[in-house]
Image (spheres, rainbow, N blue to C red):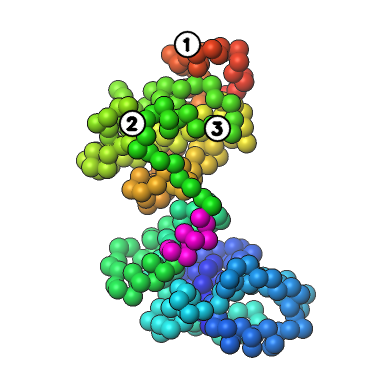
Amino acid sequence: MIMIGSQALAHLGISQERLEKADFDVIMSPEDFYKWTERYDKFIKSLVPKGENKYKAIIIKDGRKIQYEIELGFDGTSSKFLLDNLYCVTYLFSTDVLGDLYNVLSPKYQLLTKKSHIVYPVHWEKNISDYHFLKECLGDFNLIDRMKEYFELRNNEAKERYKKFKTPKLNVTNEDFFSSKLAVDHYFVHDDIHEMVKHHERPVYEMMKSNFDSAWCEKDKFFALPYDYQIQCVQEEAMAIALERYIVPQAEGWNDYFDCYHKSVKRISTTLCSGWFRTFAIENYPTIIARYNPNFVQEFRAKVDSGEIKPYEGKTLADIPDFHIGGK
C-alpha cells in the first residue's frame, strides 16, 4: 500500500496544523482494499465510490473522524504502475492513524502527481502550493523513462476525469476571442484595459505578436523577452481580467483586490489559457503573486476619472457600478 497526498508530505516539513486536517490519500491493490474494509468494518461509517477505481471512506475511531481517499490499482492505471514499481517509487515507511504501515511515495513522484492535474481548477490552491513546495525541496532533476511513463498515465487519467474543462481557441480574431459572453456585464474593451495596466510604453502582449488582428501570441517572441517582461505579461493579463470580470462589475468578492488578482492568475493557469503561456504562469506562480501591485485598482480608477479609458460604445460612466478604492 502507498501513501500519497498531504500526509505523504509530512516528512518534508509541511505544517502540523495542515496534517491534522488532511485526508489520508492512499493507493491499494483490490485485494488489499478488500482486506482493509474487512479489518475496519466496525469503524467504517461510510464508503462511497467516487470513480471507476476510487472510494471515499469515513472512519470514526476513538472519537476521531478520519477521511480516506482510496485509489485502487486496476490494470492499466497509474496507481497499478506505482504498485508494480513499489520500491522504485517510494522512499520510506509511515503508519496511519489506524496503525497500518504504508510505503510513502517519493517526492519526485509526488511532484509528478501534482503536475499531472495542476492545469485543472480542482483543489487548485492546495495543489499549486504543494507543487512549488516540492519544486523548492527537490530543485532541478532529470526525468528517467519510468517517471515519464508514470506521468503520461497520470496525465491522461486527469484529462479524462476533467474533460468538462475547456480552454478557448487563440488562433481566432481578437473580435471573436473577446466577444465570448462573460458571466458579468462588460463595460470596457479588453485591450483598452490592458493599456491602463501596462508596465511599459505598450502592453507586453503586443511585443509577442506579428498579427495584431489575431488573439494568438508567439512563443518565440515571448521567450525572447527579458524574464521581468515575461512576468509582467502574466501580471498585465491578470490585472486586466481582475478588473474586467470582478472589480468593475462588482462580481464575486470584487472588493478584495488581491483575491481578484489571485483568481485571475488561477484562471490563466487553468482554463483561460493553454500550452506554453499557461505552463509559464504555473511554473512562475510564486513570483507572479509576489509582484502584485496593490495600487492597480486605484491607478485604473484615476484613468477612468481622467477619461484615458472610455466605456464601450453606447455606454457611459453612469452605466458602470461605482467601484470604490479601499480593497485589500
Query: CA separation, marks 2 and 3?
Result: 19 Å
Tag 2–tag 1 contact (CB < 8 Å): no
- Residue 243 visible in this rendered orientation of the protein: no
- What residue is pinned by disc 3? 182
Tell me the quarter of the picture where residue 154 sits: bottom left
- Residue at position x 42%, y 43% in the image: 273
Camera-nearest residue between 14 and 55: 55
Asked if the residue at tag 3 contacts the one at tag 2, i.e. Cβ–Cβ closer than 8 Å, the answer is: no
- CA gap between label 3 and label 1 equals 26 Å
Q: What mark, if any, has residue 306 been given in the picture?
A: 1
For disc 2, the marked residue is 214
The local crowd at label 3, few if under 14, some if 14 to 19, many if 20 or more residues have their Cα within 10 Å, is: few
Res. 63 image quadrant: bottom right
Mark 1 surroundings within 10 Å by alpha-carbon count, few (fewer than 14), some (14 through 19), many (20 or more): few
Closest to the observer, 166 or 191: 166
**How far apart, in angstroms, are the residues tagged by discs 2 and 1?**
30 Å
In the image, what residue type sits under mark 3? Leu
The answer to whether 153 appears left or right of 34 in the picture is left
Chief SS of the magenta region: helix
The reply to whether the magenta stretch includes residue 264 is no
Magenta span includes 160:
yes
Q: Earlier in the sequence, mark 2 or mark 3?
A: 3
Residue type, mark 1 in image: Ser
Left or right of 253: which side holds 261? left
How far from the left and from the top, in percent, is residue 59? 72, 75
Task: Give the amino acid at mark 2.
Answer: Ser
Q: Residue at x 54, y 12 (%)?
A: 314
Assign the C terminus to one quadrant of the image. Answer: top right
